[in-house]
């Protein structure tokens, strides 16, 4: 049954103080809780009873103000505890038992290897103890952890450690006190035989913060990058947002079994170890990047999420959208802004646009859900970040900073809504964002159609802009959005021209200008133009929209060469690639234009080019992305076209690619810097074109690189290409890699993934065989994703094989996983949700498999929601 935003009511009771005591043991953990409850003066009075959330708990005792309740005074069911009569203010004591070692859902308290840890967001705290497990109930926590001293020498929870005791029976206890009131989803505990890398940070106001990263002993040598990233993030948040850290200690723990990326528990962030552990020889540049931004993301939550939290889960984007925006800005500031923007937009287009166009489309602030875990989506996160970014653009930097200052000041310590956020934007800027709020309310990606007309005699250039948003489930009618549209104009020499609107007395300085769309159609007349300009539209991707314009290929080549906006240079190149790939998909004999090849050759030969940007420009859009651009996806045609164009570029630009490869050779030790990352990216892209064109020299270089490289970026680039090529060389490389990295779990994930991604004819057979490999484990989400999700998301041509075997395989995996780990199972299903986009026969095969899920009896609410909405 769905839960609706419109049904929100404030809680009838508040909890002021929480005292918890955990007697930790993987098999039986005893949890004692003492809660100071009082009636909420702001809520309407109910029938005098109180219901607390609780799942999978064995209740041993319950007492109110020291008096044990008799069975007639309460009722326990699968979802909670109801006490029939409670006073207006009282102390509730409960004792429950839980079983971490049997917890395969990885929500609540569970075992990962030899350690115990928690994941409470969104509704996992109710698996620890009976509670008002909702984010608008904020309390102060004191937590005592008791466990065997040898097995669990390290005992961590939120806040500051205030007492340590050795107990007689070989156990010890540590008490933690968190001075900041918090919602239950931010509670955490960790117990294990862990080692810490330590450092410290002095805040802007001169407080010294102790920093600790806890890992299993053999990972101590893989924490440097995470620690550096943390310190950078702490400094950046002070400088850019005026946010200082508040506790005296900040801890991160790396865990190898984790459903998501990481979790911002107060003072004790718990991470999927993939986003902590890195050494140049074990992790790629993409991994280093991911660590930097996830460490920052979780740290930034301390203000956007923890100090100020969400009133209810419909407001999830309040913290996630804003925090993603903040981590994106951080990465842009410490790396290359254009490259960061390109990669964020790539993600948005590849994942969020399809979500917005499919059966699971939902607004940034959803109106209803069945299972909140299904709403940690790219819409809530990434489109949510775009919605914050657009407000920053509309307000301008000074006013936006005033608005965020006001938000932090006004709402510190509160559980609030996206509405409260927007009101701060309005109050600090004086702008009316009434219409802008539709970005939170309406699902769907607006499409802008932009037509241009140049009038040489009048010297005017007219842009006619229309916006249209297709209906989404439950929202048949869409109202126009308030859209910031950033544009520039280029003259014949590539110089910036002023964007001068008719009616303005004088031209503005040449450069970028922000236009605002509020109606379904606008006409902008630009004046003072003695020649037809080339427009650079939606610079920096100023709004999460699709654009259909009337530019020619020649205009796009011109923009690619001259636009001062790095993002738009890339976007022009992408559109050129895309148009050509779609034409080749329809007709294998479509000519590959000379000027297209020449444009990329010029780009490759430009000595001043930024290598990272150049690598982006030369990267073809993925088959999955392209399939979203077709009315009916032609799986095989796209794959053929992609190969054909790749090979053609590899052959035609052979000499330039070899030259780039040779001048980008690695010299000296691995460095993680934007320049070095860009150089490796370009080198490995050149290598990929050569190998995919089956160039003999390219293949030899690839084998040599696999043998000689000292950093994982170069090793993986070579291994990926060798695996794609297949044959004895591939098998030998895979074996050598496996032998070299036995025991390094995150590296083995790469070994599984590289095989699952290779678009070879035997891909599925191989993936199915790997399910039985001794290193495969269905209990480790990273391992499952490396094999199953890589195959179904990144190997489009094999997953969508015409006989439906890929679909049967995926559904088999989902059904096996669902009873153990519903969150993971529901995520795995995602590639089938797009079933209506394929040809009739594939549609039938996919629908049959989705129906098989629906018909298979006991489903989790997670999987049920995804599959029932997908079929609706
Ligand atoms: N808040 C975490 C983050 O940083 C994600 C937690 C996701 N939890 C879940 N049950 N889906 O983004
Ligand atoms: Zn987050």
Image: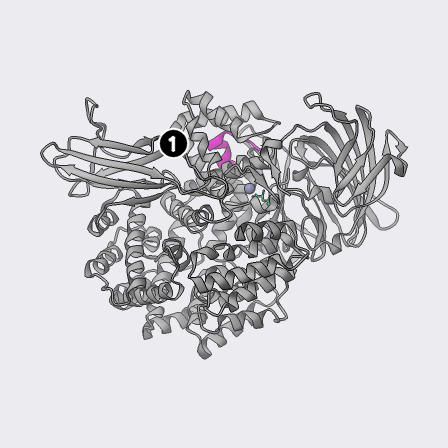
The front one of 2 and 678 is 2
- Residue at 64%, 38% (x, y): give it: 267
Q: Residue farthest to the bottom?
A: 728
Where residue 619 appears, as percent x and y from the top left, is 35, 57
| Residue 276 in sight | no
Q: Residue 263, percent across and down?
A: 60, 44
* Residue farthest to the left, as pictured: 457
Q: How is the image coloured?
A: one colour
Q: Element at badge 1?
A: loop
User: Residue 337 location, x and y as percent?
Assistant: 38, 43
Question: Dot 1, crowdedness within 10 Å: few (<14), some or many (≥20)?
Answer: many
Q: Residue 57: percent from the left, percent from the top?
A: 78, 46
250 w.r.t. 858: above or below: above
Q: Quadrant of residue 604?
A: bottom left
Ligand 1's quadrant is top right
As rendered, which of 11 and 168 lies closer to the eye?
A: 11
Magenta part mainly helix, strand or loop?
helix
Q: Is mark 1 within 8 Å of ligand 2?
A: no
Q: Which residue is mark 1?
A: 482
Q: Is residue 242 magenta?
A: yes
Segment colored magenta: 235-245
Residue ID at (38%, 32%):
482
376 left or right, relative to 519: right
User: Where's the N terminus, which quadrant?
Assistant: top right
Q: In the image, is residue 310 part of the stretch drawn in magenta?
A: no
Locate residue 406 relative to residue 482 in the image: left or right.
right
Q: Residue at x 44, y 50 (%)?
A: 354
Answer left or right for 545 relative to 285.
left
Is 520 above or below relative to 424?
below
Q: Is residue 741 visible?
A: yes
């Amino acid at each position: 049954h769905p839960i609706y935003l419109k049904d929100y009511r404030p809680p009838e009771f508040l909890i002021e103080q929480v005292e918890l005591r955990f007697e930790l043991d993987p098999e039986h953990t005893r949890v004692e809780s003492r809660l100071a409850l009082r009636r909420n003066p702001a809520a309407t009075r109910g029938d005098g009873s109180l219901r607390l959330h609780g799942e999978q708990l064995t209740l041993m005792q319950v007492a109110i103000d020291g008096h044990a309740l008799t069975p007639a005074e309460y009722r326990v069911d699968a979802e909670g505890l109801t006490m029939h009569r409670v006073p207006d203010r009282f102390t509730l004591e409960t004792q429950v038992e839980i079983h971490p070692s049997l917890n395969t859902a990885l929500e609540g308290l569970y075992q990962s290897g030899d350690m115990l840890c928690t994941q409470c967001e969104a509704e996992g705290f109710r698996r620890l103890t009976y509670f008002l497990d909702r984010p608008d109930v904020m309390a102060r926590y004191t937590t005592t952890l008791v466990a065997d001293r040898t097995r669990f020498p390290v005992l961590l929870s939120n806040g500051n450690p205030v007492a340590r005791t050795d107990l007689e029976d070989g156990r010890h206890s540590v008490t933690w006190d968190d001075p900041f009131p918090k919602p239950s989803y931010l509670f955490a505990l960790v117990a294990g035989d862990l080692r810490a890398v330590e450092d410290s940070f002095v805040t802007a106001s001169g407080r010294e913060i102790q920093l600790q990263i806890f890992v299993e002993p053999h990972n101590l040598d893989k924490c440097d990058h995470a620690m550096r990233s943390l310190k950078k993030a702490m400094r950046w948040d002070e400088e850019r947002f005026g946010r200082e850290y508040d506790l005296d200690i900040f801890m991160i723990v790396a865990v190898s079994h984790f459903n998501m990326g990481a979790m911002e528990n107060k003072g004790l962030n718990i991470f999927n170890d993939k986003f902590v552990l890195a050494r140049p020889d074990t992790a790629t540049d993409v991994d280093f990047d991911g660590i930097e931004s996830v460490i920052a993301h979780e740290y930034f939550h301390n203000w956007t999420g923890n100090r100020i939290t969400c009133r209810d889960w419909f407001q999830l984007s309040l913290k996630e959208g804003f925090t993603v925006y903040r981590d994106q800005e951080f990465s842009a500031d410490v790396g290359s802004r254009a490259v960061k923007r390109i990669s964020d937009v790539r993600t948005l287009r590849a994942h969020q646009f399809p979500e917005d166009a499919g059966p699971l489309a939902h607004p940034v602030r959803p109106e209803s859900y069945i299972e909140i875990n299904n709403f940690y989506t790219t819409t809530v996160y990434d489109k949510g970040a775009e919605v914050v970014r657009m407000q920053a653009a509309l307000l301008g930097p000074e006013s936006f900073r005033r608005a965020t200052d006001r938000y932090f000041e006004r709402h510190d310590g509160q559980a609030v809504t996206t509405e409260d956020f927007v009101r701060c934007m309005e109050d600090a800027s004086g702008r009316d964002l009434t219409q802008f709020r539709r970005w939170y309310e309406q699902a769907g990606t607006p499409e802008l159609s932009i037509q241009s007309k140049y009038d040489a005699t009048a010297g005017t250039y007219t842009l006619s802009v229309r916006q249209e948003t297709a209906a989404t489930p439950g929202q048949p009618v869409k109202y126009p959005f308030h859209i910031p549209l950033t544009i520039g104009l280029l003259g014949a020499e590539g110089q910036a021209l002023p964007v001068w609107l008719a009616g303005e007395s004088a031209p503005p300085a040449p450069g970028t200008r922000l236009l605002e769309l509020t109606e379904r159609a606008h006409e902008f007349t630009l004046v003072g133009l003695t020649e037809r300009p080339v427009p650079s539209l939606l610079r920096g991707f100023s709004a999460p929209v699709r654009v259909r314009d009337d530019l020619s290929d020649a205009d796009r080549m011109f923009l690619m060469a001259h636009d001062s906006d790095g993002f738009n240079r890339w976007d022009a190149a992408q559109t050129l690639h895309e148009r050509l790939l779609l034409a080749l998909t329809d007709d294998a004999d479509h000519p590959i234009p000379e000027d297209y090849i020449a444009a990329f050759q010029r780009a490759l030969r430009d000595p001043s080019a930024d290598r990272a940007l150049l690598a982006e420009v030369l990267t073809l859009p993925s088959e999955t992305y392209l399939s979203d651009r077709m009315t009916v996806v032609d799986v095989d045609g796209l794959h053929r076209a992609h190969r054909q164009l790749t090979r053609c570029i590899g052959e035609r630009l052979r000499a330039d690619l070899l030259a780039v490869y040779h001048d980008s050779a690695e010299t000296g030790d691995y460095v993680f810097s934007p320049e070095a990352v860009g150089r490796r990216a370009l080198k490995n892209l050149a290598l990929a074109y050569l190998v995919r064109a089956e160039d003999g020299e390219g293949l030899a270089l690839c084998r040599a690189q696999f043998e000689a490289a000292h950093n994982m970026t170069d090793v993986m680039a070579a291994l990926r290409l060798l695996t794609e090529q297949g044959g004895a060389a591939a098998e030998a490389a895979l074996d050598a890699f496996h032998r070299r990295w036995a025991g390094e779990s995150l590296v083995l994930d790469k070994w599984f993934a590289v095989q699952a991604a290779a678009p070879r004819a035997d891909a599925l057979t191989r993936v199915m065989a790997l399910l039985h490999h001794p290193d495969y484990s269905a209990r480790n989400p990273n391992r499952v994703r490396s094999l199953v999700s890589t195959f179904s998301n990144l190997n489009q041509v094999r997953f969508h094989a015409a006989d439906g075997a890929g679909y049967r395989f995926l559904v088999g995996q989902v059904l096996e996983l669902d009873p153990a780990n519903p969150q993971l199972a529901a995520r795995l299903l995602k590639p089938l949700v797009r079933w209506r986009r394929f040809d009739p026969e594939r549609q039938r095969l996919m629908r049959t498999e989705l129906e098989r899920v629906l018909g298979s009896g006991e489903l989790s609410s997670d999987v049920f929601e995804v599959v029932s909405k997908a079929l609706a």
